Image: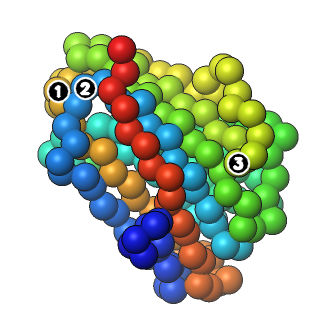
């Protein structure tokens, strides 16, 4: 953190980073954030996630993959019992990056018993899309209670264009209605 944004410097292929806001615990969050990668990594790319609910190591998150082609994928994933499951995945249409372009991410995680997770991604400066790009529902018992928010990143072990620097900025978390 530099007082204005969080920065992760991935100097080694296969490296990861994570952080959580333990003071935030909710079953209904609406998160927005700005994500920036300084350059498009080669190899398997960089994965950057915003976590909407984390309970004892299990979580729901929106995962952005910065691919070596400049394309960007957006996933909703669930991690439980040490296993990550992709609940929905798309390559974001009409979005190609060359590095340094900020992206806006919005993630909502709501409900208990059945949790709804939805996300969308767009270039900063453009209008937020009205429709969610990825949506999923899930009933994993361990995740049907209030949880923390956070982030995690992973740089593919096949990346050789080092370092890769990731920034998380403008994080706003509000309760959903």
Q: Position of residue 159 (x, y in %)?
A: 62, 77
Q: Which residue is mark 2?
A: 27
If you read the primary sequence from the N terminus, does the residue marked by circle 1 or circle 3 appear first?
A: 3
* Residue that appears at 72% across and 67% down: 100
Is the residue under label 2 in contact with that under label 3 (CB below 8 Å)? no
In what element is the residue under mark 3? loop
In what element is the residue under mark 1? loop
Q: Is residue 167 above or below residue 49?
A: below
Q: Distance of mark 3 from mark 2, alpha carbons?
A: 28 Å
Q: Considering depth in this image, is 36 or 134 the residue closer to the camera?
A: 36
Is the residue under label 1 in contact with that under label 2 (CB below 8 Å)? yes
Q: Which residue is mark 1?
A: 145
Q: Considering depth in this image, is 21 or 63 the residue closer to the camera?
A: 21
In what element is the residue under mark 2? loop
Q: Could you classify mark 1 by the number of other residues whose Cα lies within 10 Å: few (under 14), some (14-19), or many (20 or more)?
A: some
**In the image: residue 99, left or right of residue 74:** right
Instruction: For the N terminus, give its image quadrant.
Output: bottom left
Q: Position of residue 173 (x, y in %)?
A: 38, 39
The label nearer to you, 1 versus 3, is: 3
* Residue that appears at 22% across and 42% down: 24
Q: Distance of mark 1 from mark 3, alpha carbons?
A: 32 Å
């Amino acid at each position: 953190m530099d007082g204005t944004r969080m920065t992760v410097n991935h100097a080694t292929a296969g490296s990861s980073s994570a952080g959580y806001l333990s003071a935030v615990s909710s079953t209904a969050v609406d998160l927005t954030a700005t994500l920036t990668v300084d350059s498009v990594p080669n190899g398997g790319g960089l994965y950057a996630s915003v976590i909407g609910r984390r309970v004892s190591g299990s979580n729901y998150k929106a995962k952005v993959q910065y691919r070596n082609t400049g394309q960007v994928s957006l996933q909703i994933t669930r991690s439980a019992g040490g296993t990550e499951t992709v609940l929905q995945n798309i390559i974001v249409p009409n979005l190609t990056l060359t590095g340094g372009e900020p992206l806006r991410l919005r993630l909502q995680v709501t409900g208990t018993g059945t949790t709804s997770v939805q996300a969308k991604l767009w270039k900063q400066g453009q209008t937020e899309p009205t429709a969610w790009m990825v949506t999923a529902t899930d009933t994993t018992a361990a995740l049907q209670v209030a949880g923390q928010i956070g982030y995690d990143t992973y740089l593919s072990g096949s990346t050789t264009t080092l370092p890769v620097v990731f920034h998380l900025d403008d994080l706003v978390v509000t309760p959903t209605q």
